[in-house]
Image: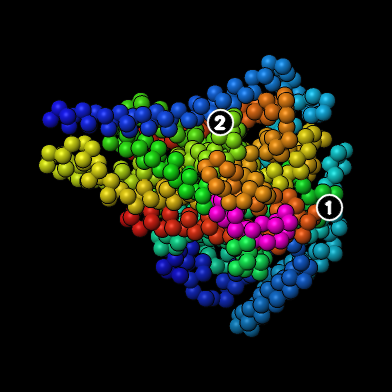
């Protein structure tokens, strides 16, 4: 505990005292509400959660009562709230709709009950902290910290639920055949082998475009110019705009410029994805070059080395991990992109393995898009889960490697 | 000696050329998109922004997609800003350095989940969820798009605003703590106001990602080119600029292609403004903290 949180936060849960239990209960109630508002509301989980938590609370209060012999108003209030929560799904109208013409949605009971759970939990946290801390300041601080903790927990659990869902559903369709066979019957049978190869080839092409351009640009920016000059500022601004440019716009650009020249092909896709990932490579290499101490350059110059010799022999070797990070993160982005290549580089079926740079390819991301569109028309959902799992694994692995290298060398 | 100097000069010009090439890409993108959309602008003029989209009748009003983009962005930001900033406050200020060193990379890794995966998850999870929770005929709504995009933008917003909060000098925080303020008062009244420009950069960049996102939104938003009735009804199917382009470019011909390029120009202009705005704020921050 001490290792992981700030002191002020530890204070709330540090010692296990009985007066911490209501805080914990309110916390769990609002967390369950937060999860249920996004996942399917289950009456059973709801009732059992409220019921068991209130039992724990009542036991705690009874122990307190036998010790202090004081009649506690809280027991009555909390029992009433528990009763209210337990009967809430039946008390609330089955749906609340709005009497505005054209608005056809209604807030269903499931939504309202989850929302009520969250609100009761949040209020409960605030009031139960009154028993823990004497000063109003600390009560405020405690409840604010728990709210922030709830935000973190809900973000992490939603993201993990999504990952777990993909893993559980996807792992059953992963097999040797799925990885090595050709796509057949519009993706409903067979495997995704050409799509994996296509994605890897596109990644290779992307790296061949973005690394020379990106590393070259960052060397110019860091080694050959004054970092405050207007030229540098201008280049950075342009690179930032390129970084923010939506991927579909890159796709349109490719459609306008490269498709007339090279057709729908591996080459077109590589060029577009290379431009898309260029800003990522530039940023990481810039950071890497900047982190090389000035003394190293000075020492090299003092030995009579020219600027290029200095860059080649003294600056680039220590900056290499950072440059690799940029390349790896860029590749992770390129593997996952769909919008830039959908009109410019890929076919859903029939592309096979490309024989030359000017052939179209398959790609995992585009394959997943087409399978998603076919759900409901063809029995493809099992294959779609498998494809999603493979794509997610490749992209997250690349990201993980990139971030790990950066962590390791930034310190 | 002179040969060496010539070589050095040549190498410098090679790097200069590479930089000019990298810098010019964005201008090429603008030029080619505008060039392709010129016929649409010439033929339709301001009708390009009218309310009616009917490809068969030759009516190409982009307004429904523009409105859809704005509504989706608002929904996504309303969901993701409070949760995202709350989470970044926790990671930056309450978690210990050890916990932070686990959480920050985790969030950054999760920021890389491909948008098509979110689109797929949106169809199998969030479309049925929206339909049943809000008792709708169809779960393919603007709200669903906003919800999926909010989840997708969260790691980005968290990561950038955490960086902003971290850049607030410790002296400021310590001064406040020394005056007897609690940790929470310091966070609310000192750290957050000091980092507000960085945090707003995070929101702007998050908004940029939301506006420009294609795959996650096109699969769940319903892709119907009509204005919601009333205009703020987010529980109706709609279209965004990106989903319009992605859905129609495959089958488009004639003037419609140019209209879709014009939609791309609008999109790119919006994004460019946001990017320049965040750069400008960043510049102000650097001046403020003298870094």
Number of dots carrying numbers = 2
- In the figure, is residue A405 to the left or right of B36? left
- Could you tell me residue B73's position as x and y percent? 65, 40
Q: Chain of mark 1?
A: B
Q: Foreground residue, B275 or B84? A: B275
Asked whether the residues under the numbered discs 1 and 2 touch, taking CB atoms below 8 Å apart as contact, a structural biologist would say: no
Mark 1, secondary structure of its residue: loop
Front residue of B20/A162: it is B20
Give the label on residue A261, or none.
2
Q: Residue at x 80, y 27 (%)?
A: B52
Q: Which mark is residue B135?
A: 1
Q: Pointer 2 indicates a residue of which chain?
A: A
Checking the image for residue B214, the label placed there is none
**In the rendered image, the vertical position of residue A166 relative to residue B228, given as above or below:** below
Q: Position of residue A88 (x, y in %)?
A: 80, 64
Question: Label 1, label 2: how many angstroms apart (C-alpha)?
Answer: 50 Å
Residue at the extreme bottom of the image, as rendered: A66
Q: Is residue B58 above or below residue B238?
A: above
- The one nearer the camera, B208 or A116, is B208
Q: Is residue A253 visible?
A: no
x and y percent of residue A368 in the render? 66, 53
Residue B254, quarter of picture: top right
**Residue at point 27% right, 49% down?**
A317
Q: Is residue B60 visible?
A: yes
Snapshot quadrant of residue A35? bottom right
Q: Give the percent coordinates (x, y) of residue B43.
A: 72, 16
């Amino acid at each position: 505990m001490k290792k992981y949180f700030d002191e002020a936060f530890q204070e709330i849960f540090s010692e296990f005292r009985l007066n911490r239990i209501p805080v914990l209960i309110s916390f769990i109630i609002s967390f369950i509400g937060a999860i249920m508002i996004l996942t399917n509301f289950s009456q059973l989980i709801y009732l059992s959660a409220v019921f068991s938590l209130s039992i724990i609370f009542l036991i705690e209060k009874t122990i307190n009562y036998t010790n202090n012999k004081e009649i506690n108003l809280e027991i009555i209030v909390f029992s009433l709230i528990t009763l209210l929560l337990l009967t809430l799904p039946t008390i609330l109208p089955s749906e609340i709709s709005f009497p505005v013409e054209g608005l056809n949605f209604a807030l269903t009971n499931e939504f309202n009950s989850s929302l009520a759970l969250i609100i009761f939990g949040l209020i409960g946290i605030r009031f139960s902290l009154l028993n823990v801390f004497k000063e109003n300041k600390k009560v405020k601080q405690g409840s604010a910290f728990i709210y922030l903790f709830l935000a973190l927990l809900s973000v992490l659990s939603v993201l993990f639920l999504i990952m777990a869902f993909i893993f559980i559903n996807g792992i059953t369709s992963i097999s040797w055949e799925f990885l090595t066979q050709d796509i057949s019957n519009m993706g409903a049978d067979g495997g995704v082998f050409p799509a994996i190869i296509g994605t890897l080839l596109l990644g290779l092409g992307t790296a061949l475009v973005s690394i020379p351009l990106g590393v070259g640009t960052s060397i110019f920016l860091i080694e050959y110019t004054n970092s405050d000059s207007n030229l540098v500022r201008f280049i950075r601004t342009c690179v930032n705009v390129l970084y923010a440019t939506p991927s579909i716009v890159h796709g349109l650009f490719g459609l306008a410029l490269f498709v007339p020249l090279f057709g729908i092909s591996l080459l077109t896709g590589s060029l577009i994805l290379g431009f898309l990932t260029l800003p990522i490579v530039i940023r990481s290499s810039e950071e890497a070059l900047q982190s090389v101490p000035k003394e190293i350059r000075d020492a090299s110059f003092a030995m009579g080395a020219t600027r290029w010799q200095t860059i080649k022999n003294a600056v680039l070797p220590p900056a290499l991990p950072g440059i690799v990070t940029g390349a790896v993160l860029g590749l992770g982005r390129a593997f996952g992109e769909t919008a830039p290549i959908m009109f410019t580089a890929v076919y859903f079926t029939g592309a096979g393995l490309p024989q030359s740079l000017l052939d179209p390819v398959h790609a995992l991301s585009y394959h997943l898009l087409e399978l998603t569109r076919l759900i409901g028309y063809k029995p493809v959902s099992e294959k779609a889960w498998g494809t999603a799992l493979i794509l997610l694994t490749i992209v997250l692995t690349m990201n993980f490697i990139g971030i790990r290298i950066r962590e390791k060398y930034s310190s | 000696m002179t040969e060496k100097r010539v070589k050095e000069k040549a190498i410098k010009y090679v790097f200069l050329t590479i930089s000019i090439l990298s810098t010019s890409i964005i201008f090429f993108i603008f030029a080619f998109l505008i060039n392709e959309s010129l016929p649409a602008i010439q033929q339709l003029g301001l009708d390009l922004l009218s309310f009616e989209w009917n490809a068969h009748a030759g009516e190409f009003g982009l307004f429904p997609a523009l409105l859809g983009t704005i509504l989706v962005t608002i929904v996504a930001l309303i969901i993701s800003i409070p949760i995202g900033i709350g989470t970044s406050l926790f990671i930056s200020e309450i978690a210990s350095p050890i916990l932070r060193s686990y959480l920050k990379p985790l969030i950054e890794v999760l920021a890389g989940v491909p948008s098509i995966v979110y689109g797929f998850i949106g169809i199998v999870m969030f479309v049925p969820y929206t339909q049943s929770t809000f008792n709708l005929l169809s779960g393919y709504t603007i709200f669903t798009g906003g919800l999926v995009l909010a989840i997708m933008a969260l790691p980005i917003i968290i990561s950038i605003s955490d960086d902003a909060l971290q850049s607030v000098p410790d002296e400021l925080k310590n001064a406040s703590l020394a005056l007897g303020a609690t940790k929470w008062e310091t966070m609310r009244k000192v750290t957050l106001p000091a980092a507000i420009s960085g945090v707003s950069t995070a929101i702007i960049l998050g908004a940029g990602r939301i506006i420009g996102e294609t795959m996650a939104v096109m699969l769940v938003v319903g892709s119907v080119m009509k204005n919601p009735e009333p205009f703020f009804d987010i529980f109706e199917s709609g279209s965004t600029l990106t989903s319009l382009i992605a859905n129609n470019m495959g089958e488009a011909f004639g003037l419609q292609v140019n209209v879709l390029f014009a939609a791309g120009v609008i999109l790119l202009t919006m994004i460019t403004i946001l990017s320049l705005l965040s750069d400008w704020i960043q510049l102000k921050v650097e001046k403020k903290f003298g870094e």
